[in-house]
Image: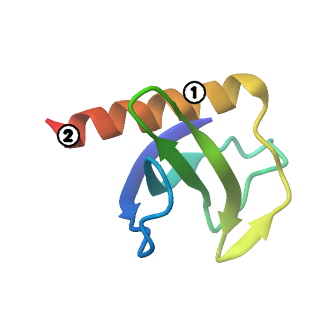
Amino acid sequence: MKITSFSVEQLIDPTGILIGDRFEFFLDIEVDEDDELYSENGVQLRVLFYKNEDDSRILNYHFLSADTILEFALDEEEEKEVTIFCNNQLLHTEE
């Protein structure tokens, strides 16, 4: 899995109840044609990401193709890769 581009937006909690920050990432990913996840329309990974002073993690994610949710899961290594990617992007936006 190769991330080719992304967008990120901070989600605002209007109630102020939630601790930490939430972000919505849309990751455009490159998938090999022989992979069962491959789609001619391209594949995105939508990630809801949590970040606090001492903690950051994926809260939820979905693979999307042409606005259709695909029923696939990240393996443990891919989940670590996405977490590192999101953390790194948030570090760059804070600078």
Residue at x 67% of width, y 67% of height: 65
As helix, strand or loop, the secondary structure at mark 1 comes to helix
Q: Quadrant of the N terminus?
A: top right
Q: Residues within 10 Å of mark 1 (few under 14, many from 20)?
A: some
Which residue position is annotated with label 2? Answer: 94
* Amino acid type of the residue that numbered disc 1 sits on in the rendered structure: Glu
Which residue position is annotated with label 1? Answer: 81
Say left or right for 62 vs 21: right
Residue at x 70% of width, y 57% of height: 63
Q: Position of residue 94 (x, y in %)?
A: 20, 40
Residue at x 56% of width, y 35% of height: 82
| Towards the viewer: 23 or 13 | 13
Q: Residues within 10 Å of mark 2 (few under 14, many from 20)?
A: few
Q: Position of residue 81 (x, y in %)?
A: 57, 27
Residue at x 70% of width, y 22% of height: 77
Q: CA distance from mark 2 to mark 1?
A: 20 Å
The disc, 2 or 1, on the residue closer to the chain's N-terminal end is 1
* Amino acid type of the residue that numbered disc 2 sits on in the rendered structure: Glu
Q: Position of residue 11 (x, y in %)?
A: 42, 65
Q: Is residue 77 above or below residue 57?
A: above
Residue 70 falls in image quadrant: bottom right
Residue 90 falls in image quadrant: top left
| Towards the viewer: 11 or 2 | 11
Say left or right for 47 vs 25: right
Q: Quadrant of the C terminus?
A: top left
Residue 48 falls in image quadrant: bottom right
